[in-house]
Amino acid sequence: MLASSAPRSPRVARRPAAGLAVAAGLVVALGAVRPVHAADPMPVPPGVLRGVDVVEQPGAQVPLDARFRDHTGRPVILAEVIRGDLPVLVTFNYSSCPQLCDAQLAGLVKALAAVRLVPGRQFRIATIILAPGETPARAARTRDSHVAKLRELGGDVVADGWTFLLSHDGKDARAIDAVARATGFGYRYDARQDEYAHPASLVALSATGTVTRYVHGLTPVGADLEATILRAGLAEYSAASGFLMACFHWDPDGRAAWGRRLMRYGALGFASLLVLVVAAVLWRRSRHPSGVTPS
């Protein structure tokens, strides 16, 4: 267990993390859809990513009374995850994220496998699901896949070491927003694409729920992550590390969504045709077991 003490005075000035220009460029690099007749990627309009940033707020207190459900469906408040005995790493993700969330969590798992600390023993992890409509069953599957990968890489997680937190009623995002605001985590929902534009960052909290450090990017360095956890356990503030990346799949004409629907319906049609062919063959064989059909 890490020692916990009263927070020291912040040694890091409050400042915005890497700006939207970096985020927008990386979004395009991470798979923005190209128009049919264009040689270059369609640039992401600045307004789409407005507010999608991290404004670092060392020393800020997260709302411990925020109401959630965990990945088992049990109602919890944030204070049950941040219980005053271990520091906590917070990530913001959602299971249907088209690109960066899975990569971010996979990078975190890789880093966790390289440290000597075990979630649930020396620290905890809380993944806050941005999509209020996500179900506990879906979140549990996502969590289980990453926990399994961590163990495959030689790491471990104690039972309550990694908690996924969801909207308490499947639609109310106020608790999600409250924690995001407290940590300076900016994100936006795009209704047309049913996606969330958000940074890839984790936030380290002291055992009492104060922000101590930000780690930006997809794959933290194991030694840096371990130092982040140890300092959070001592409630020590430190400068952020890594580069800010934003997750958003820009589809200006809706072609990607149309393409996904076309592929889905095409696959369904092919499967239906295959079933009909197999059924016809079996029916023909049942009518003529010898394999010889009358001319």
Image (tube, helix red, strand yellow):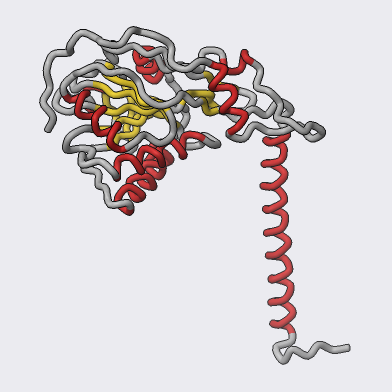
Position of residue 206 relative to residue 137, above or below, is above
Residue placed most toward the observer, 194 or 3: 3
Give the quarter of the figure containing the N terminus.
Answer: top left
Residue 245 location (% of width, % of height): 49, 26
User: Depth check: 78 or 273 in front?
Assistant: 78
Which quarter of the picture shows residue 6? top left
x 34%, y 36%: residue: 221
Asked whether residue 157 appears in the rendered view, the answer is: yes
Work out which residue is located at the far right of the displayed protein and give it.
Answer: 295
Is residue 8 shown left or right of residue 266? left
Q: Picture coordinates of residue 128 (x, y %)?
A: 37, 28
Q: Is residue 62 shown left or right of residue 128? A: left
Q: Is residue 57 above or below residue 291?
A: above
- The quarter in which the C terminus is drawn is bottom right
Camera-side residue of 28 and 253:
28
Q: Position of residue 271 (x, y in %)?
A: 68, 59
**Side of 123 relative to 266 (left or right):** left
What is the x, y in percent for residue 283? 71, 76
Number of dots carrying numbers: 0
> Measuring 82% from the left and 33% from the top, which residue is drawn there?
37
